Amino acid sequence: MTTLATLELDYFRAVSLYRRRSYERCAELCNALLQAGHDGHVQLFATKESEHSQEEEEEKAQNQKQKLHQQQAEHENRSRFGSNLQRIGPRPRIGAGAGAGTGAGAGADSGASIMMPTWLMEGVWQLKMRALTQRVYLDDLEVDENGDEAIEEVEFERIATAARPGSSIKTAFQPRPLTSQQRQQRSRGSGVAHSSDGRLNSSRPGSAAVARPGTSLSRPGSSMGGARPASRCGTASRVRATSAAAFNVGDATAKLYQASRLNPTIYAERETLVKALFQFLFYHEADVQKAHSLCQAVLEVQRQSKNSASWWWPQQMGRCLLALHYPRKAEPFLQQSLASFPHPDTYLLLSRLYQRLKQPERALVLISEAADQRPFDVIYRLEQARIHQAMEQQEESLQLYRLVAKLQPINIESLASIAVGYFYDNNPEMALMYYRRILSLGAHSPELYCNIALCCLYGGQIDLVLPCFQRALATSSQPEQRADVWYNLSFVAVTSGDFNLAKRCLQLCLTSDAQNGAALNNLAVLAAQNGDILGAKSYLNAAKDVMPEAEEVITNLQYMDVHYKL
Amino acid sequence: MSLFNVCSWWSAQCSDPGEEYDVASLLCARFGLEAQEKDYIIVGSQTGQLSIYYPHHRGYDATDLLLETQMAAPIVGLYAGKFSGTVRNENANQLGVLLPNAIVIYNVLAIGGLAEHGAQLRLQMQAEHKFQRVAFGLCQGHFGQVKGREFFCVVHLDGTLTFYEQDGISYECRFPGFRALPAPVVYCERTDSFFRFSATWDLQCYSYQDLSHSLVTKSSYQPTWTQCVGEGIVDMRVVQVKANCSYIMILGERNFISLDDNGKFNFMLKLDYAPKCFISFVVGYYWEPGARLITAIISDSSKLHLYEEANLIWAAQWPNQSPAPVAIQRSNVHNLAGGIVTLGAKGQLEVGYLGADPFQFQVQPLKLEELSFAQAHKELQQLEDEIKEAVDVRVMDALNQQAADQVRLTFTIQSEVNDDLDTLLLDVPADVAVKELPSAKGLLRCRIKAELAELQLVFQTPSGVRCSQDTLSFVDVAAGTSHEFKLDFYIAELLHIHSAKVEVIASFVSPRGIPRVIQQSANLPLSMFYRACQPQKAAGIKLTYSIISRHVTPKLATFFGEFLEEHSESHALGLQLLCPGLEKQSEGITLVAAKNSNRIRIQSDYVETFAMILERIVERTLQLDSSAGLIKMDKKKPKKGVLNRCVERLIAAPFLPVQPILHRIDVHHDTQQSIRKQTDQLEELWQQFKTLQRNLQEQSEGDPKEALTMEIESNYDQLILEGDKLVEIRRDERRQRCDLNCAVALARWIIHALNLEERVVNVVNSVLSVPIEDWTELSWEESMAPGIDMLHHFGPLTRSKSTSTHGLLDSNANPKESFDYSRFRRHFATLFDRIIRLASSPMAIKPDDSKKPTGEEEKPAAEQQVDEIGNMQRMLGEKGLPLGPPKRRSNMSSSLEAVEDDEEYDEEDLREDVGYRKEYGTTDGTHTSSNRKNRSEWVNEDFELPTTEELFSDLGIWW
């Protein structure tokens, strides 16, 4: 027989698990509790919040009455909640039992022991919701933007580095240092990219290889293996949603968390829950639409009750609108939030917003404002650097990255960006130094090894190239990572003139990731070199299907069209 | 990270190795037992194990453990303070152990160790306060700024507080507002107030006065101030940094926040890691200048970050701490001042210091053994297999075989027909339903052997026939599942159907993204489409097949089991189409098997009746023959000069009903034209309509509108009328397309069994593919034109000698602009004509086919015709039936005569059809061999333009 005390103790254990970030186990424990409550027909949220507080008042009064009772007649049991102190712990406690188990308590015990109080049920419900949210939480400021950009402007190198939105852990940590820089490099004449451009006039092979350094190391804590809790492997919303769904399979209490059945206006008035609920919708369910309507409902309630608006809801509103691609609508909300409180997230959201509106200067002004207030906060410096980079101002951006590295020597994003800068500057040895620094920070990822290997390759330290790639292969777990490693290995083969090996490598890249356009393109070049014009053509067409806007593929196709009548 | 590192100084494993520890399980405190006392480390687990350690020197020693005891209940928290007023020693602290339903205050007593046993501690219970609600935590302090005593209050799970101020006196109270998830409550001595994290994620400050006042008067009270934190918190502490200021340090789930005790935000630092626990402390004394506020935060990946205020000053990776500790304390233990004490979730207790032991990230060494050849070969083979499996498309047969293994399809159609079709359920149109046409039942079994990401099954039926299932899609199919589908095939439209073949196409994508397609086909019973009737003696079109295969008995019963019994000796069979295009006339076809020879004659007046019958004859013959297994009909690349292998099984008389086929094309073309015309007209009317509407809008208010409205109405009516007409024409077009399908299929099946070079058959048949397709922009004729043109100019059927045909190709590349129907028709007719001529030419005749007449190109057909007719006459004559005159003869020759060619060659060329192939065959051979030699050269060296010859040899097209 379960008693209130054991239930409460379980609740305590759940809270304790939550505090030490064992979200999975916390959710499991919550499930058991919810199941128990469900069996006991405890009504969740049956009362309105106002009544709720009334009820609490009553309860309080009752408690106080009881306290009086207690003071008058000690050890008398409560009328409402049964107490059975004998059963609290894992083992019976004689001392306490002697105190509580006297005569009068026995009758009340058996009656009330199974009943779970509503507040407990609600607490467990909320705790589970928070645990589920935290389990999959990833900073949307790091994630969303990548997905968006991949969709919005289908940047070539981004796709070439296998950044399909929501595909793998890498997506979340997409190579900031890569964008645009690469393009510049390409136009600067493919110094590094001399490899197999040859015949077909394609700059693709070289640049794609070079695109690799810095991959995925850019973000702090990224790809550091355990930098983020291992449980949070889901990244973008799609993966997140599936992982969440999978977690709910076989969970009888899952129906308590069905977002689709949620009515925002009902919950908008429950101040205690609604923030947690919002985060649950936004981060766990990845249902931005629903989260947005919840925001709207809450703001509406606040407007009606003339509550002084805090910064929180406008910020979330802006977040939702930004995620829904309404940057202009989001702006006033974020500005309003910023006016009442200078939260770092608000700054970053606004900066993102301006960038999306193609007003990077404005974003820069805003961020430098924040940076002036907190000159040592690397978050703003990093954001500045990223904006400069997006504006293709390499010098400024590198300057800022150097500053960040000075302020926070463990900031991997800045180190990786500087390394990439050196790499493109035909200085692979310096890049190698930075990468080794990152390695010594404990980062230990296939991408890093891959980058080191490439630096070694172009820096002439041939003996280290293959071992590094071997490590990269050994540590890669995702198919996309394997694809990348094989893709880069093909460059080693090309550099050493072994086209057959290169072809194999590219084919292996395709076995792991059949949608790798860069590999398809390079296979086409190799095929053409072998005289297989038709094969080359079909590879190019496949590449074009995968990456319809890739310059190289288009150039190559045009070259084919001009020079071969087919 | 840096030169410095967290070095382990002392470590111990607490007695309970389970995951039973959290942030409140660790306490570093002094109890005032001796003069030079340092910190004791007290650990209590949630199973009730309480241990007290007193590290003496580097490394754990058994004497460091001073006390180990088992509590009766889980230990929720450990606290030290001056909880009792009855102790004389001013420095003495008591140990408060928080259990779920009680707080027990112990005096700690030391027992001096004898000899080398070391000292021990003993707990003496001083007070026990019980409460009913389960506790979550405890908040202690000099409430009300009382000196010398510390009060405490227990925070319960349900949010109530129980205050214990004097021994044995307690109050219960609640913070106003809603119940929140349990969170720590802290007390700030400077302002004598409590900080509480509310349900709305605000930090609220309550003064002790209000609280205690409310305890007495039961009055309500409000927080002194409220600040929105906006996220869940991990932990919270109060640190006094200056004499006039305390800071509230909050470790949020995403940010590190600091407020001063007046509720002003000090800073908010966004963390780029997941924080787990933290400690804030002041280096120096707060009443002196130069005190530094230091915070140590441990991230979830076991990294220690040290901040001064909000600036990172130091960071280090914990070498062997994973997962990250759940609690951290800074403590002065014996021989080590300012040690960092951490407790892991499983009770790993460690005291560390920031030492100059550079943390070298140790990369696990790769096990690089000397590779043996066998090993390397195996690995290489594995990789090769991977390639082969996924991307190598050179060995299609193996791939298809593998795909067929992954998804096994068994598709059968019963040969009996049923009449019990539920026409309502299947939504059969009324005009078809009343005819009560028979339907067939099929069964598809699908066993999936490998895991698939997606699987789609599509049923491809000839137009007019419908399947009860259209498309089936599955997602994430597990290996080992199997499905079974019962299918109904029925006629849904009254059209001429060109084939009885139904195909199932299964396309699937493996979890790795590799797509595969497999297909299976089965034939519908002919009794779905025909019914037996009286054989007819005379007919417009007569075709003859000779069955040469020894494994096929040339009897009608072999082929038409639906209509004849197995051993029926019947030699003539009349069949009638069940669903003709027109109601009035019945379209019949008659099949006659020769009694003494191996020939079958098929005759009918209607082109549409043939397709399915011919399909049945040819396919059944090939199937019976290959099941007898003598000649494999495998897919070898056709070589030049090889005869159509089909001919070894059966051979068709070289005759094509050219005129009827062309007639169908004409009709189809006319309809296409009228559709275009009709669309143009509609467009025009629509423009008019729009103009009128615009006029109506532009008209000023006062003007009468009647005239315009009427005009619009009439225009609209006309528009509707013409639209209906278009619909009507489209319906016609559909019918004609099906007729044309039948006609083209007829030609295909004849050519399939013609005595020609195999490649010719393949090429021509691939050009004449059925079902034909009309696109909105391009009619079938237009899309066919380049193909026919190609055959005309370059195919094996041409004999033009000019090879500089490149320009021609290009000019033909855009058929839309230069589409000339008469030219197309002429080419089409010539094509058929040439095929017939080739097929009946002496060169193609097999030696054993003595029955085939030889002679001049015009003659054989005629002779054969006569011969056939003679046979027929005999056959029918025996039955005593009169023989009709051979109608088509004149027609056929006239079709040949009608052929004229314009530019490239003259009639002369047409006639010498023996010579050309030889000639081309040889040149072709040299081409390929030379190509093979210098193939890579020409690409590699100078990127010369390949000649058209080379290109075509690549394309597999020859001339």
Image (cartoon, rainbow, N blue to C red):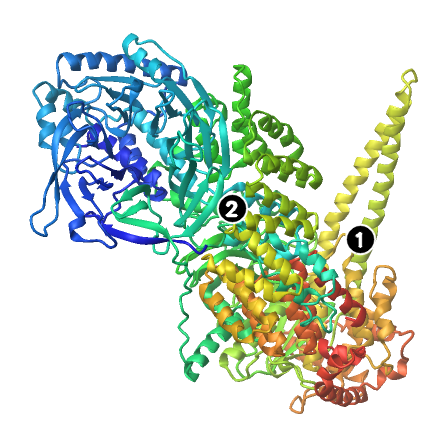
Q: Is residue B924 left or right of residue B62?
A: right
Label 2 resides on the chain identified as A
**Mark number displayed over residue A484:** none
> As displayed, is residue A132 above or below residue B118?
above
Asked whether residue B78 is in view, the answer is yes
> As displayed, is residue A535 above or below residue B697?
below
Q: Nearer the viewer, mark 2 or mark 1?
A: 2
What number of labels is visible? 2
Q: Secondary structure at mark 1?
A: helix
Identify the residue at image location x=45%, y=42%.
B307
Q: Quadrant of the N terminus of chain B?
A: bottom left
Front residue of A139/B933: it is A139
Identify the residue at image location x=49%, y=72%.
A467
Q: Dot 2 corresponds to which residue?
A: A238
Where in the figure is residue B755, as x and y percent of width and height? 69, 82
Q: What is the three-letter code of the residue carrying label 1?
A: Thr
Where in the figure is residue A110, as x and y percent of width and height? 14, 24
Q: Is residue B349 left or right of residue B820?
A: left
Front residue of B677/B233: it is B233
Front residue of B710/A133: it is A133
**Mark number displayed over residue B671:** 1
Q: What is the three-letter code of the residue carrying label 2?
A: Arg
CA separation, marks 2 and 1?
51 Å
Would you say the residues marked 2 and 1 are in contact, meaning their CB atoms lie under 8 Å apart? no
Which image quadrant for residue A274?
top left
For the residues beneath circles 2 and 1, the answer to whether they share a chain is no
Q: Is residue B312 left or right of residue B158?
A: right
Label 1 resides on the chain identified as B
Q: Secondary structure at mark 2?
A: helix
Which image quadrant for residue B793?
bottom right
Where in the figure is residue B584, as x and y percent of width and height? 70, 52
